[in-house]
Image (cartoon, rainbow, N blue to C red):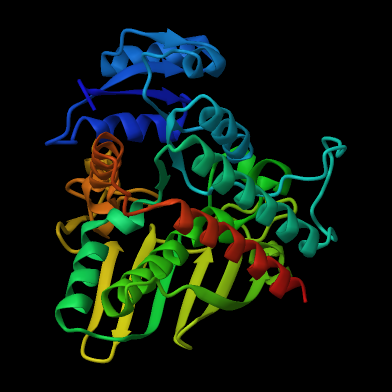
Amino acid sequence: MAGPLRIAVIGTGFAAHFHLASYRKVYGESFEIAAVCGRNGAAAAALAGEYGIARIEREWQAVLADPGVDAVDFCVPNDLHVPLILAAARAGKHIICEKPLGGYFGPADADADWSAEGFPRQAMLDAVAAQARQVREAVAQAGITFCYGENWVHAPAIAKLDRLMSASNSAILRIEGEESHSGSHAGYSRRWRTAGGGSLLRLGVHPIAAALWLKQQEGRRRDGVPIRPARVSATTARLTGTAGFRAQQPRHVVDEWIDVEDFATVTIMFEDSTVAQLTSTDTRLGGIRNFLTAHGSRAQVTANINPNTACQAYTPDGRYFADEYLVEKTETKEGWSFPAPDEDMITGYPEELRDFVGAIANGRPPKSDLMLACDTLVLVYAAYLSAED
């Protein structure tokens, strides 16, 4: 590609902020942020001003119509992912899209009070499988590069785990993993219509995608083809709806869920009859718990993304650390804590975007690709079906 890759960031919320912060840490690649796009003009202007971006657009259609934009980075709500992906593919733009690929957000004629409680999960699975097919066909027809924003695949600890499995020539027999915290404070997360699911779709996709990617890598090393998921079983629950929890005050975890789960556990059986056991919940106190363990035939490796012991701190009074960021989702700064010296780096975002920029510019596949995006999405909704049955 002649000249720097020109990327437009579409969206002005939390994801757009950490993407732009992480782009600043990308090295060794030639690119520029050509524009920020968001319907909230004030938010777009503030974001562009913070990161020194000259161009602001209010409508994504203008970005897709601009030949001066090579790629779009979608940092928008989940229900907009597939429509914008299809539009970007038609426009011939390379795509970076935050997780998940898509989701089910209700029937086309659903009103604002639509609830997923009691709605058949088979219909949801059929719908997202159709979404995945649409996206695959659109990307293939356009001949563009699709990059799936799964940061766990790019986290240094997961990358090292994969290298150690490769170095020991281990067959990965079992994978354990979890992403849990005390609950999202975003209003959209409370109901299926705006979130597309609960803890499984918001949190569980991370360890799921990482497990799928590790087995893909193992298969490619051994036989030249990825090992794919074959079956899934799952249990979901709303733990904050139980009588014991509702009887207590004060409550220290988010509990305003409307029709989505706050706990899920899945068991994945792969084509080679190995397994992954993965959990996600919005009921964990003490900060985020992000880990993945691979039990191999010649090695066992655990990747602790959060918490990790790169930095440890103690204070008897949280007010002493009042103006200092420690780590996401902790309820208090008192006592022992595990401050993240560079949270973006540890969670993989700068390396993710460096890989994506290089993949688009050089015409090579990204580590986190469309197959991973589709497999993760369809597996999640198959898990919802399993939990219903």
Question: At 14% from the left edge and 59% from the top edge, which residue is drawn?
Answer: 310
Name the spot of residue 141 as percent of width and height, x first: 53, 39
Farthest residue to the left: give it: 28
Farthest residue to the bottom: give it: 297
Which quadrant, please, contains the N terminus?
A: top left
Question: At 26% from the left edge and 74% from the top edge, which residue is drawn?
Answer: 221
Q: Is residue 312 above or below residue 21?
A: below
Question: Which corner quadrant of the image does residue 81 belong to?
Answer: top right
Which quadrant, please, contains the C terminus?
A: bottom right
- The answer to whether residue 182 is visible is no
Foreground residue among 325 and 125: 125
Q: State the count of labels.
A: 0
Q: Is residue 159 above or below residue 55?
A: below
Foreground residue among 188 and 62: 62
Question: At 55% from the left edge and 35% from the top edge, which residue is drawn?
Answer: 85
Foreground residue among 139 and 301: 139
Q: Is residue 110 above or below residue 133?
A: above
Name the spot of residue 279 as percent of width and height, x first: 50, 71
- The answer to whether residue 143 is visible is yes
Name the spot of residue 61 as percent of width and height, x first: 56, 16
Horizontally, residue 5 falls left or right of residue 233, namely left
Question: Which corner quadrant of the image does residue 163 belong to?
Answer: bottom left
Question: Which corner quadrant of the image does residue 374 belong to?
Answer: bottom right
Q: Is residue 345 above or below residue 1?
A: below
